[in-house]
Every structure is written in C-alpha cells, then in structure tokens.
Amino acid sequence: MFWFSQRRLTTGFFLAMATLGLVLTLGWSKPANAVTARDYNDLEFAPLGEIQIPEFERYELPNGMVVYLMEKHDLPLISGSATFKAGEFMEPPGKAGLAGMVGEAMRSGGTVSYTPDELNQFLEQRAASVETSLEATSGSASFSALSEDLADVFSIFAEVIQQPAFAPDKIDLIKSQYRGSIARRNDDPDEVTTREFRKLIYGEESPFARMVEYRDVDNISRDDIVDFYQAAIQPRGTILGISGDFDAGQMKALIEEFFADWSPEVKGKANLSLPQVQQKTNGLYVVDQPQLTQSYIHIGHLGGRLDSPDHAPMVVLNEVLNGFGGRLFNDIRSRQGLAYVVYAFWSPRYDHPGLFIGGGQTRSEATVPFIETMYREIERVRQEPITAEELQYAKDAVLNGFVFNFATPEQTLSRLIRYEYYGYPSDFVFKFQKEVESTTVEQVLAAAQRNLKPKDLVTIVVGNIDAIDPALGTLAEELKITPIDITITRSSRVREMGHYSDLTLRTVRQALDNGYQLKAGRFSQG
C-alpha cells in the first residue's frame, strides 16, 4: 500500500513539474480580446422601454360589484382579490380594533360549510390560500391557487366573503392575541416613536392613529363583529380583480355563479365618510426610557395627498434628501457620524393627508446635534434651490425605478383597482411620470416652501433623557418640552385585583392574555 501511494505521488510530481516547465517556456500571453475597464461615468445605457399595460377587461355585476380580469398564461397560477369599501374609520367609539377583528375572523372563524380546521385543511391540501383583512380605509379578501383548483378554491373564497361563521372560540383567540399585543406594545422603541408621533399629528381618536386598549377589547362582542360585517361588507363598492392562467369565459361563469346573487340585507347604516384631518399640535415631546443607550427620533408634520399638484416635485425632493448620496446621508451620517439611519420624506396618501416625516436613531449624547442638523436641512431646502446635478440625479432615480411598479400583472392590476377605489384616473401614474420628467429646480423650491412648515414641526424623542448631553432644552429656549406617558392601562378585570402583589398581578395578566377566564377565584379556559 505504501509503495502504491508513493508511486502515485511521484507520478503526480513529475506531471506538475512538466506542466510548469511548459508554462515557463511559452510564457503568459495577454488574451487577444481583453477589454480595458472603463470609468462608470463613461458607461452608456439604452433608454428604458415604454411600459405596456397588459390587456384587461372591466365590467360590473347588477349588484354593483366591479370586476377586473387580466389573463397571463406563463404559469399555471391564478390569484385574485376583493377590495371592500370598509375599514377602521367605521368603528364606533369605545370599540377600537373592531374592524381588525372582523378582518381576521372572516377567514380564521370558518364558514357556514367549513369549520376553521376543515377550511385550513382544504386549502393546505391544494397549496392554496385565502386571506382577509380590514385596514384604516379599506378591506380586502384574497386568494391564490393552481389553475386546476380554481373552481374549488374560488367557491371557498366566495363563501369566506359572503358566509363567514365567526366561530366564537376563534373570536376569543383573536381577542386574546390583541391583549397580548397590547401588553407588548412598548417593547420596541422604534414602534413607540412611530405610534406616538402619529397620535400627536392626527390625534388619539383618529382612525389613522388610534390605539386599541384593553377596555376596547373587553367591549367587543361577537354580536358587534357580526353587525359590523353585515354593515360593511357589501357588493356595492366592492372591486374584484383576478389575474393569471384562466379562460375569460369560464372565469366569468364562476363569478356569475358565486357573486351575481350576492345581495345581503343591509343591517345598520354604515358610515362611509372619513373624518376631517387637522394637525393637533406641534413642539417637542419626550418618552423617557432610561434603559436605552440611544435616542429614537421623529420630526415632521401633517403632509398631503397623492393628488396634490406638488406630488412630483416633492417626490423629487425626497430623492435629494435620502439614500446613498442624499444630503442627509452625506451630512448626518458620513460627515458628522451622528447616525447610521437617517431619513426625511414627504409621504402622501390617497384619501387623506399623509405625513412629512424625518428622523433616525443616534447615540444619546448626539441627540441634540442630530435634531439641530435635521432642522437646518429642512430649512435649507426651503431657502436654497437644489443644484441641477441633484435635480437630474433625483429625477433619474424616480424614473428608473418606475418600471418596478409594473413588474407583474398582479402589481399592475392592483394599481388599477386602487385608482378606481380611491377615485383616481386610471392613467394617474403615467401623468405622474410626465410631471417628474418636467420638474424643474424652481418647482422643487416652490413645493418645499409650500409643504415644509418649520413652525408646525412635531419632534419626539424616545430615549434616556438624563443621558442626553447637551440637554434637549438647549434646542430653543421657547421650545416647551412635554413628556408623554406610555403606561399601559390595565384591563378592568385585572385592575380590580389591586390587593394582589405585583408578581401575582403579572401572572394573572398573562393568564388572561392567553385566553383564560377568572371565575370564583379560579382560572378556566374558554
């Protein structure tokens, strides 16, 4: 064995030496087709191709439901969604979270034909999904399936929308999850900053900032959930969109079969008007968190809508301020080293004013310099025109990313549905594209002066206030500092047990959050 191994090594050695000798004899030659590296500034790219909207069909059912169909046959998959004229803005006082519970329970609570477990099994066996949710100003139900399973999955999708069972045990589980979420809502300082900032801008009772409390969860019954569903989920105002590998004729037949006769009795009058939005306050606010070693900061005020005439120039300004090479990155992060994350952007919404919001995270002792630089950069874009180079860079960034709005038929169809739902023209995004292309330095300056309002700024700092040096009071003598209390109000069931020790109280709260009930001094589940 040793002789064999040594022989192999000797043979390998001579072969390697022979190869090396051949290389040394012939020498290394430069490939004939070698290309000299070019500077990135010299690179030239062909212009982006014009975006083509895939063909689609739109029609209405007699019950008022709008349907969009968009075929694509490259994969044997189909997806669809129904968008409802419903949302958190419809919640009655004292029952925050009701819409969200309805959105979850429509799917998780089963249907009249399928228990929750049977529904889950049915979909899992077909690698399909059906999901539902209700957000601030809209609701949705969606499905995805293989083409061969369309009929079965679509029937389930229709039943989840029209005949949810709202199983009581699933509602109890959802309420328990809400309680658990309330108990943990102060764990992430970044989430605390965003939440409290929105409350300061919109007001605590606004559907765009409202928080769910234990008392709200306790106030919501299954009857409330059923009543809200019956008032909110109606065919009139609903937009159904389906894309993928289907035959239009067969798809229309399925829609006719499962949705044409959908005309539920309307119980209760739904409030479909959004509340008026006005900024509630300004100034400097703090949430003292002594355990933190850095400050979480938001700076901003009420913003605008997507149909604002300043939409395009403000989006261009966003690019000037943000990202690698943006003013905030270059100054606050690169030059001063004050933060790893920094941003400021005008964020409009379809149907209500959005936010102008800036901020980031920085070490405690750098808090005041960070805020001062943010104030200075906001004022600078209001007083000085951006450069021609910044304008071109920003416009290119917006326009080059434009194509990603239409990467898939699902994205395109979703955009068309959103425009109809919120009352925007179907070519809104292309008008925006042209406005970006024609945006000038002067338009950006004028838009910044109209939309950025230093006197309206709300600044919130979540951090160790005692560790901030220089102190926040050095920002401005006339700037009042207002503390915010984020203490979580206990559930009435727990608050009544004030004679228990803190340790026992935490145990009781955890048990209640996990779905147990306290009866006659003993816990029982359900």
Image (tube, helix red, strand yellow):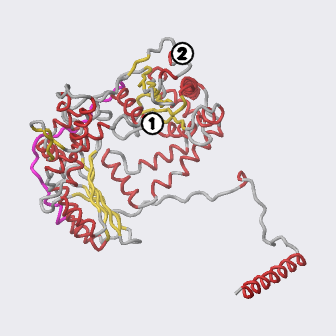
Mark 2 highlights which residue?
Answer: 474
Q: How many marks?
A: 2
The front one of 300 and 250 is 300
The front one of 510 and 415 is 510
* Residue 350 sits above or below residue 117 on the image: above
**What x and y, as percent, mark residue 456?**
44, 22
**Residue positioned 65% across, 38% down in the render:** 388
Mark 1 highlights which residue?
Answer: 309
Going by the numbered disc 2, the residue's amino acid type is Thr
How far is the residue under mark 2 from the one under mark 1? 38 Å
* Residue 10 sits above or below residue 508 on the image: below
**Magenta stretch?**
256-279
**What x and y, as percent, mark residue 474?**
54, 15
Going by the numbered disc 1, the residue's amino acid type is Pro
Which badge, 2 or 1, is on the more N-terminal residue? 1
Provide the secondary structure element on which disc 2 rests.
helix
Which quadrant: the N terminus?
Answer: bottom right
From this viewpoint, which residue is outermost toward the top? 477
Q: Is residue 28 left or right of residue 503?
A: right
Q: Is residue 267 left or right of residue 400?
A: left
From this viewpoint, which residue is outermost toward the right? 25
In front of the other: label 2 or label 1?
2
Mark 2 surroundings: few (<14), some (14-19) or many (≥20) residues within 10 A: few
Decide whether residue 259 is among the magenta residues. Answer: yes
What is the chief secondary structure element of the magenta stretch?
Answer: loop
